[in-house]
Every structure is written in C-alpha cells, then in structure tokens.
Image (tube, rainbow, N blue to C red):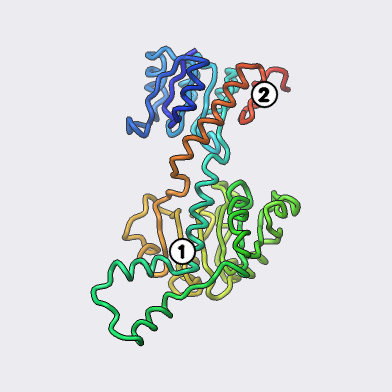
C-alpha cells in the first residue's frame, strides 16, 4: 500500500505510517493547494500509485472512488463532510475521521476570551501601547484605573450553550476559578454535565442566569438561529458574551443591537456571518468587541492530535480490529 497525504501529519505520525506503507506527502498548508475537482484529484493519486488517502482540506467526491481503487480514506476533520461517504461505503472503503481533534485548542481560546473580557485586557493593553503622555496626576490615574477595573470569574455564573467535546472542556477549565457553571444541551444527560462540574439547565435558565455566556453548538440546521431576539432579551444587563462555535447559531441583528447598546457589556467572537472577517465588519468596529479570524482550532498541536487518531484507525483496521474513529461502520467485516 501507499498513502497519498495532503493533511498535516506530524513526524511521529508519518513514522508510524511508514512502518505500514509507503507515503507520498503534499501537505496542503505547504503546497497552498486544495483539490476540489474529483477527476483532477484522482489523476494525482493514480500518478503516485497510491491506494490510501489522508486529507484535511481537500474534497473527495464520488469520482475519486470511481477512478481510484482506494483501500482507506482518512479525513482529518471533526465530521468528514469533505468526503462522499456514501460512495466510499458502496465501495467498501472505510472512512476514518478525527472528532474533537481541535477541542482543546478551542477551549483554550474560549478561556482566554473569558479572562480578557472579565479583566478588560484588550482595553488595558491598547491603552498602554497607545499612550502618548504619562498620566499627569492622581485624578487621571484613578479615572484610568477605574475604567479598566474588571471582575473575577470566581463566584460568577458561566453559561455554556452546547456541551459537547468543546463545551465540556471549557467547563473543566473554568471550574478551578470558582465559577458556577450552567450547561444547556438537549443531547447530554445531567450526569454527563456533572462529570465536568456543570449543572444541566434549560436554555432560558442558562441565558437568564449567566454572567458570562459562551456558545459551542455545531453547524447543523437545528442549531441555526438557536439564540434569537427572544433569547437575547433574556440575558442579564451587562452580560459578557463569547462565541467560538458558529455564528449562524445566533441571529445577527438582535445580537448587534445588544452589543451596540451595552446590554451585552463586552463580547468576543472568533466566528462571523461573513468570513474572512475584516475591519469593516460592524461588530469589529464596536469598542466593546474583541474579534479574531476563526483561529479557535488553529494550534500546532492539532496536527499531533489528528495524526495520532488517523494512525490509530489505520493500525486497527490492518490488524482486523474495529477502528476507534470509523465514520461508516457498515464496511467493517461482520457488521450488519
């Protein structure tokens, strides 16, 4: 076997794969190329004589499975939406994926946002870097000091909407600060919430009691517009709002009005309705909003996580064992 790899796989992962097969690497982050056309991609795979495919950004449509006799496909994503799984399943090709590969990274950024908002870090750093003159007297110093005096997470209620892999990790990071944690997720039990130090509650209660609210719902139709004008009206006056999940889960207009009016005291967003986000975005222009360009999952360690997960799957499959992250289990011998 020989693997055609366009995903970012770390050296340890490559070493594990080389014990099993030859490898050809065209890391998309180095080549700056993403394959969209199935026929073009199939030609490249055939030219290299490969029958195992490991991708991250590229698309693997039906044409690839029709034109290449693939043995396995690995998709370094939380959901292999870039792979035609139905076509793979018809051909008996296992599709491996990497759920929660970037959960630690997103949870870290979320905690960073919560602390930045609580302690006015962005305003304080901007003040120091932009300061042209020394503060002249005690009165001016006190005015500056009071304007940047923040709050503690200790004793505050952190509301988490969406308690999957990322939401749970956020709770586990916040808990040592002494916060009370409320979680909303209709697919998670009270016991599962309690394991991460959170109390399960309905959405209205989470919204109305949160001092800090953070959103971690997936990009699925059921979650779009989950928080609209009615829900935003339930928020406390002066709540802090974080979204590192998906912009579409919150209705844009009522959220903007709440931020602009100060009902939401400060907000931090890593996701936007139109991306890539730029300085002209109306949310970015608000003085009480921190904005980052959808980098929540962008840590160097993500490549390490996804590499290990894909290697675990390939090693298990070749050993005749059911892989831990097999998206189409019907292809596993004896299933069905």
Q: Is residue 253 visible?
A: no
What residue is shown at x 57% (from left), y 28% (from top)? 96
Give residue 286's quadrant in the image.
bottom left
How crowded is the residue under tag 2: few (<14 C-alpha within 10 Å), some, or many (20+)? some
What residue is shown at x 45% (from left), y 58% (from top)? 269
Query: Where does label 1 land, which residue?
Result: 116
Q: Callout 1: helix, strand or loop?
A: helix
Does the CB distance between marks 1 and 2 fall below 8 Å?
A: no
Sequence-wise, the earlier of marks 1 and 2 is 1
Residue 181 is situated, as x and y percent measured from the top left of the image, at 65, 62
What residue is shown at x 28% (from left), y 69% (from top)? 130
How crowded is the residue under tag 1: few (<14 C-alpha within 10 Å), some, or many (20+)? some
Give residue 183's quadrant in the image.
bottom right
Query: Where does label 2 land, which residue?
Result: 322
Q: Quadrant of the C terminus?
A: top right
Residue 185 is situated, as x and y percent measured from the top left of the image, at 66, 54
Q: Callout 2: helix, strand or loop?
A: loop
Measured in 3D between alpha carbons, the distance from the residue under mark 1 to the one under mark 2, in whole angstroms, is 44 Å
């Amino acid at each position: 076997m020989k693997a055609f790899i366009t995903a970012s796989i770390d050296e340890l992962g490559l070493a594990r794969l080389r014990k099993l097969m030859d490898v050809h690497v065209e890391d998309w982050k180095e080549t700056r190329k993403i394959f969209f056309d199935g026929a073009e991609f199939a030609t490249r795979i055939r030219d290299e004589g490969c029958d195992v495919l490991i991708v991250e950004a590229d698309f693997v449509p039906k044409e690839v499975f029709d034109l290449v006799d693939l043995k396995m496909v690995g998709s370094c994503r939380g959901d292999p939406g870039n792979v035609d799984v139905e076509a793979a399943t018809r051909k008996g090709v296992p599709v491996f994926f990497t759920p929660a590969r970037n959960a630690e990274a997103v949870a870290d950024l979320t905690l960073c946002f919560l602390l930045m908002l609580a302690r006015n870090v962005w305003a304080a750093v901007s003040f120091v870097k932009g300061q042209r003159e020394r503060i002249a007297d005690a009165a001016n110093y006190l005015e500056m000091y009071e304007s940047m005096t923040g709050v503690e997470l200790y004793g505050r209620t952190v509301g988490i909407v969406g308690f999957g892999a990322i939401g749970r990790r956020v709770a586990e990071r916040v808990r040592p600060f002494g916060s009370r944690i409320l979680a909303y997720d209709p697919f998670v039990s009270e016991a599962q919430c309690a394991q991460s130090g959170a109390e399960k509650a309905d959405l209205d209660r989470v919204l109305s009691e949160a001092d800090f609210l953070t959103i971690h719902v997936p990009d699925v139709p059921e979650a779009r517009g989950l928080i609209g004008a009615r829900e935003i009206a339930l928020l406390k006056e002066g709540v802090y709002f974080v979204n590192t999940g998906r912009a579409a889960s919150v209705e844009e207009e009522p959220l903007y009005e709440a931020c602009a009016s100060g009902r939401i005291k400060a907000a931090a967003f890593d996701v936007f309705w139109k991306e890539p986000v730029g300085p002209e975005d109306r949310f970015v222009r608000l003085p009480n909003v921190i904005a980052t360009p959808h980098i929540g999952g962008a840590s160097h360690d993500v490549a390490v996580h996804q590499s290990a997960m894909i290697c675990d799957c390939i090693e298990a499959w070749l050993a005749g064992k059911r892989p831990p992250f097999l998206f189409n289990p019907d292809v596993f011998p004896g299933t069905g």
